[in-house]
Image (spheres, rainbow, N blue to C red):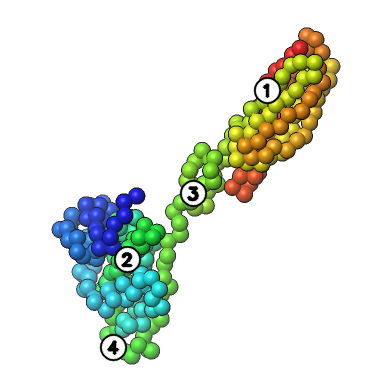
């Protein structure tokens, strides 16, 4: 992933978020020194495609939006500096276009077409350690008569997006899944070989980084050859002797291993084969 300074802007894709409100959007003029420009242009462009009057850009709301995404600022989310009703939306993502999209998804897209909001301001912060952009948009409706801050209405809660996806544990065939989806467990990670000799031996090898409990059964004409339960270490192996099969009798051998993966029981190994004298 490419690291960027906090003021850099990928203008060519920064307005993808606008598509959440309408199917088309205007391409802005690039300004690498103004990271707020793409956000303002996205909001103004989508507002122009509604029946509402154009937004009035508020420096007061911009200051509040910038404070909301500034790390360590105790005033983050405090909107009482604006005399009126205000709503703050914060989206996170990388690059900036994704952060704008997230802000649209969790509420900004709908508020743009709400004609009761007449003012807006935006903020932006780049976290280089997390390689994540924070985009804040504050919508406001000013009081008809300015009132002291103490009499101003309480701000609405900050809407923060939930994670869109999560990383699966190593070994899963699906590297990432949705935030509330289950990671698929590894399968067929156990190999079994039967070594013939005066004393027949079973060798089991585990290719998964999962500890498991296994069962071994061998059934044929005239009854079972051997039934065993044993434990298998992560990436480990196990060996044990079994009785010698009867001549001309084929035994069906089944080995099954279960373990815990992503917090749930999973069969990570299943092997079936036929053996005979």
Give me the C-alpha separation between circle 1 and circle 3. Answer: 34 Å
Q: Earlier in the sequence, mark 1 or mark 4?
A: 4
Position in image of residue 14 (x %, y %): 26, 56
Q: How many marks?
A: 4
In the picture provided, is 72 more to the left or to the right than 8? right
Q: Hey, which quadrant is residue 96 in on the image?
A: bottom left
Label 4 or label 2, whichever lies nearer to me, is 2
Label 2 sits on residue: 125
Label 1 or label 4, whichever lies nearer to me, is 1
Label 3 sits on residue: 167
The residue at the point 21 percent across, 73 percent down is 56
The residue at the point 78 percent across, 31 percent down is 228
Q: Hey, which quadrant is residue 161 in on the image?
A: bottom left
The residue at the point 38 percent across, 83 percent down is 153
Judge whether 249 appears above or below 265 on screen: above
Q: Which mark is residue 5?
A: none
Q: Is residue 266 visible?
A: no
Query: Contact (CB < 8 A) between labels 1 and 3?
Result: no
Q: Earlier in the sequence, mark 1 or mark 3?
A: 3
Label 4 sits on residue: 146
Mark 2 lies on a secondary structure that is strand
Position in image of residue 80 (x %, y %): 36, 82
Q: Hey, which quadrant is residue 212 in on the image?
A: top right
Label 1 sits on residue: 193
Mark 1 lies on a secondary structure that is strand
Q: Is residue 126 visible?
A: yes
In the picture provided, is 75 more to the left or to the right than 119? right
Q: Residues within 10 Å of mark 2 (few under 14, many from 20)?
A: many
């Amino acid at each position: 992933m490419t690291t960027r300074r906090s003021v850099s802007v990928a203008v060519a894709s920064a307005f993808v978020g606008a598509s959440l409100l309408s199917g088309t959007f205007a391409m802005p003029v690039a300004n690498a020194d103004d990271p707020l420009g793409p956000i303002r242009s996205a909001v103004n462009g989508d507002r122009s495609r509604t029946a509402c009057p154009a937004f009035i850009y508020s420096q007061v709301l911009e200051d509040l939006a910038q404070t909301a995404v500034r790390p360590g600022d105790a005033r983050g989310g405090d909107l009482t500096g604006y005399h009126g009703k205000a709503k703050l939306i914060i989206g996170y993502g990388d690059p900036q276009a994704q952060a704008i999209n997230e802000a649209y998804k969790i509420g900004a897209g709908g508020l743009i077409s709400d004609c009761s909001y007449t003012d807006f301001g935006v903020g932006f912060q780049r976290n280089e350690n997390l390689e994540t952009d924070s985009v804040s948009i504050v919508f406001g409706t000013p009081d008809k008569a300015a009132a002291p801050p103490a009499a101003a209405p309480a701000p609405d809660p900050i809407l923060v997006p939930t994670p869109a996806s999560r990383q699966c544990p190593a070994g899963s065939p699906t590297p990432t899944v949705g935030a509330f989806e289950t990671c698929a467990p590894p399968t067929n990670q156990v190999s079994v070989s039967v070594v013939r000799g005066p004393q027949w031996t079973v060798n089991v090898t585990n290719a998964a980084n999962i500890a498991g409990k296994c069962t071994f059964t061998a059934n044929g004409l005239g009854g079972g050859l051997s039934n065993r339960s044993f434990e298998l270490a992560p990436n480990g192996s196990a060996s044990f002797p079994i009785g010698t099969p009867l001549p001309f009798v084929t035994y069906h051998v089944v080995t099954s291993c279960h373990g815990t993966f992503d917090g749930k029981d999973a069969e990570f190994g299943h092997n079936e084969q036929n053996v005979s004298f």
